[in-house]
Amino acid sequence: MMSFICLDADSHRLIALLGDRFNRTIKNFFIAHYSLAERTRVQTVTMDMNAAYQTIIDIQQATALINNKPRKCLRWQTPVQAVSKPLSRW
């Protein structure tokens, strides 16, 4: 079985070594360890030629587009901005 190696591109520091390369394992790791705000700030992803990883990137990019679009129902805030405020400030 092949592993998934996650490295910091700037420091080349090992972030995680996952036991398999299944999409659900990789996606669950990032959801569990990084907030939505952190995941939407990602600008570049470098990956090997495994085509299965592309679906994870596509989902993350689509989510970032959706969560960073201002909405009239949120008083022209983005969803990321809206959820970062305490409910008492609405």
Image (cartoon, helix red, strand yellow):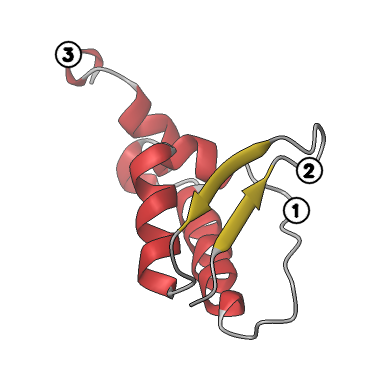
Q: Earlier in the sequence, mark 3 or mark 2?
A: 2
Quick one: SS at disc 2? loop
Q: Earlier in the sequence, mark 1 or mark 2?
A: 2
Which residue corresponds to the image point at 36% horizontal and 70% vertical from the top-left?
Answer: 24
80 vs 43: above or below: above
**Residue 5 relative to residue 69: left or right:** right
Q: Nearer the viewer, mark 3 or mark 1?
A: 1
Looking at the rendered structure, the kind of residue marked 2 is Ala
Residue 28: quadrant of the picture:
bottom left
Task: Check disc 1 and report the residue beneath it.
Answer: 44
What x and y, as percent, mark residue 9? 78, 43
Q: Nearer the viewer, mark 3 or mark 2?
A: 2
**Dot 2 crowding, Cα within 10 Å, few <14, some 14–19, many 20+:** few
86 vs 3: above or below: above
Q: Quadrant of the C terminus?
A: top left
What x and y, as percent, mark residue 17? 53, 51
Which residue corresponds to the image point at 65% horizontal and 46% vertical from the top-left?
Answer: 42
The residue closer to the viewer here, 24 or 83, is: 24
Task: Check disc 2 and report the residue beneath it.
Answer: 9
State the mark number for residue 88: 3
9 vs 59: above or below: above
**Residue 38 relative to residue 13: left or right:** left
Label 3 to label 2: alpha-carbon separation: 39 Å
Tag 1 near tag 2, CB within 8 Å: yes
The residue closer to the viewer here, 75 or 64, is: 64
Looking at the rendered structure, the kind of residue marked 1 is Thr
**Residue 6 relative to residue 47: left or right:** left
**Dot 3 crowding, Cα within 10 Å, few <14, some 14–19, many 20+:** few
10 vs 47: above or below: above
Q: Earlier in the sequence, mark 3 or mark 1?
A: 1
